[in-house]
Amino acid sequence: MNKTIKLPTECVKPDVRKLTDKRIAVTGGTGMVGSHLVAELLKLGCRVKLLVRPGGSCSQLEKCLQQQQAAQFADQIERCEVPLNNPLELGEALQNIDVVFNCAARVSFDAEESEQIIVSNTEIATQVALACLENHVGLLVHVSSVATLGSPKPGCDEVTESCELTSLKERSPYSVSKFFAENAVRRAALRGLRTVVVNPSVILGEGDWSRGSGLLIATLVSKGTPAYPSGVMGYVDVRDVVQAMLLLAVCDGAIGKRFILSGGNLSYKELFTLVAKAVGRRPPLIPVGSGALHTFAHLQKLFGAEQLNDTLIHVAIDQVRYDGSAVCRLTGMHYTPLEETIDRVVKQYLQDRIEKK
């Protein structure tokens, strides 16, 4: 659960209003993190250059702007269709830009998409970082993941920013792709680009209910479950991710560093119980081990379904805890209690389901 983080008495919260004077570009602005980021930038009074793939839909962004009371500022968005893997078009789009927030990435745990995920995420980060260098962009804020981090150091039970990944063996394709992407940003930093990297744990928030944590919440709310796997994972509110990105973007002490964003660590039993509580349902009572999960995955494949694979089983039983306190000590930020986040997200899902009928 959330733990109390003691802040230095001299800690002064950076003034995010400094961003209003900056020329800002956002990639991945139609996803969950990106759309919430754009909403907050607009409410600050910023103009935003939104880099989207040709023909890309902005429906999730539009919905987010409405939910976050930012729709009235939508005319401050300059939509720019550009393939992020095209260095010429990307370079042209980033001319005269001061700050780039790179939220673009493909997320998938489908084994059939393994190669595409690695190539796509690595190439996007590489081209964005190089374009920032070549166009003398003042700052690149890159959204990475805790999946790029190594195991806790001896004597510690939580992963910190200093835990380097030393082997890609048994890592998921998504983890490998984010590791390569973050290293592309690091290489650009060695060449003089000012960078800040954020490494969120599992992000909880309003958005696409058909994938990621949104799908997990939707499934738990719609169907419920009497069982739970044994794993433990870090979680963070999407609004906290955005707040951290904004604060770090105006904090000189953040340059060249990476920051874990994690509001607390929950077992799956705790997570499933909080969701059940939010909908007035009985909590899960039956623990499920790896053997049962592998058997279930095998049965799924026999019947032509492949939702549960080895990667997801590993995630379900792995017990990893993250320390997200460094950003709080530097910026004075406070995380939203996870119970509050889950309650809000569940209510939004129920509201969206009603409106869809």
Image: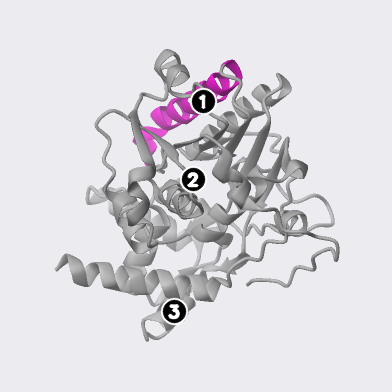
Q: Amino acid at mark 3?
A: Pro
Q: Magenta part mainly helix, strand or loop? A: helix
For numbered disc 1, what is the local secondary structure? helix
Vertical side of 207 occupied by 175: above or below: above
Residue 46's disc number = 2
Image coordinates for residue 198, horizontal then vertical, percent? 62, 45
Does the magenta-highlighted stretch encompass residue 73?
A: no
Discs 3, 2 touching: Cβ within 8 Å: no
| Above/below status of 142 relative to 146 | above
Q: Which residues are magenta?
A: 110-134
Quick one: label 3 or label 2, which is nearer the N terminus? 2
Viewer-side label of 3, 2:
2
Circle 1: residue type: Val
Q: Nearer the viewer, residue 134 or 272?
A: 134
Are the residues flagged by discs 1 and 3 in contact, CB closer than 8 Å?
no
Q: Which mark is residue 284?
A: 3
Callout 1: few (<14), some (14-19), or many (20+) C-alpha neighbours within 10 Å?
A: many
Place residue 240 in its image quadrant.
bottom right
Alpha-carbon span between mark 1 and mark 3: 44 Å
Tell me the SS state at disc 2.
loop
Q: CA distance from mark 3 to mark 2?
A: 45 Å
- Identify the residue at the far left of this view: 357
Q: Amino acid at mark 2?
A: Cys
Q: Residue at x 38, y 57 (%)?
A: 70
Can the viewer see residue 19?
A: yes
Identity of the residue drawn at 51% across and 60% down: 239
Secondary structure under the numbered disc 3 in the rendered image: loop
Q: Which residue is mark 1?
A: 128
| Mark 2 Cα-neighbour bin, 10 Å: few <14, some 14–19, many ≥20 | many
Relative image position of residue 84 (x, y in whole percent): 41, 25
Measured as percent of width and height from the top left, residue 166 is found at 71, 34
